[in-house]
Image (spheres, grey):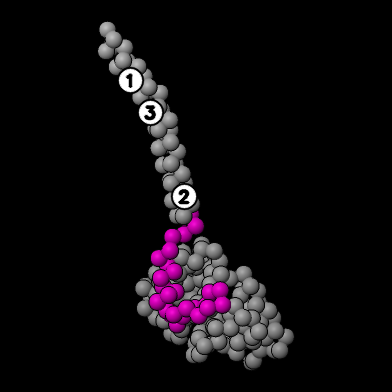
Amino acid sequence: MGRTLANKKEIVTDLKEALREAELGFVINYEGLSVAEITDLRNRLRPSGASCKITKNTLMNIAIDGDENWQPMAELLNDATAFLFTGEEIGAAVKAYKGFQKDTKKTELRGGVMEGRALSKEQVEALGDLPTKDELYAQIAGSINALATKLAVGVKEVPNGLARAIKAVSEKEE
């Protein structure tokens, strides 16, 4: 039994909402995955705020039609397609997918779209090497802490140096 027109419109609306909220969308070939494996992929993506949508390419084509940010995705729409949409945690989502791909060896990354630009498979995988937001915060905090420590040592050294100089002069005068 096929989908009704109303059901298809609902799916397209859902896809448009997912696209509106996504920073990066990448396309994988999910042929051969079982329902349990797709569920595993979705569970791995969830902590990073990413989602996995499986829909007909025709419905995705309708969803991206007229949207310049996502139009490059049209060239990736063929065969059995799953769409992974990430939020701000792009690196974490790509890492989660790469871990899944390594474990199952059943999917193939075709490419992605970010900020209206088509990305190759290699470019999407390179995004997985980027630090997460939490890692960046930790690096910034560490840098600020190191700067404050250096400043405190420098400020403390001024009176200590002055005290040593006074002591050296007073010992010289004796």
**Image quadrant of residue 72?**
bottom right
Residue 117 on image: x %, y %: 53, 78
Which image quadrant: the C terminus?
A: top left
Q: Which residues are magenta?
A: 109-134
Q: Secondary structure at mark 2?
A: helix
Badge 3 is on which residue? Answer: 157
Q: Looking at the image, which residue sits at the far bottom?
A: 1
Q: Secondary structure at mark 1?
A: helix
Q: Looking at the image, which residue sits at the far right?
A: 6
Please tell me which residue is depicted at 40% across the width and 65% down the height of the picture.
129
Label 1–label 2 contact, CB within 8 A: no
Marks 3 and 2, how far apart in space? Answer: 26 Å
When the figure is inspected, residue 2 is found, relative to residue 91, above or below; the finding is below
Q: Is residue 134 left or right of residue 102?
A: right
Q: Secondary structure at mark 3?
A: helix
Q: Amino acid at mark 3?
A: Glu
Can you tell which mark lies on residue 149?
Answer: none
**Image quadrant of residue 162?**
top left
Does the magenta portion include 126?
yes
Q: Amino acid at mark 1?
A: Arg
Badge 1 is on which residue? Answer: 164
Q: Residues within 10 Å of mark 2 (few under 14, many from 20)?
A: few
Residue 96 shows in the view:
no
Q: Residues within 10 Å of mark 3 (few under 14, many from 20)?
A: few
Does the magenta portion include 56?
no
Please tell me which residue is depicted at 52% across the width and 88% down the height of the picture.
75
Marked residue nearer the N-terminal end (3 or 1): 3
When the figure is inspected, residue 28 is found, relative to residue 4, above or below; the finding is above
**Image quadrant of residue 22?**
bottom right
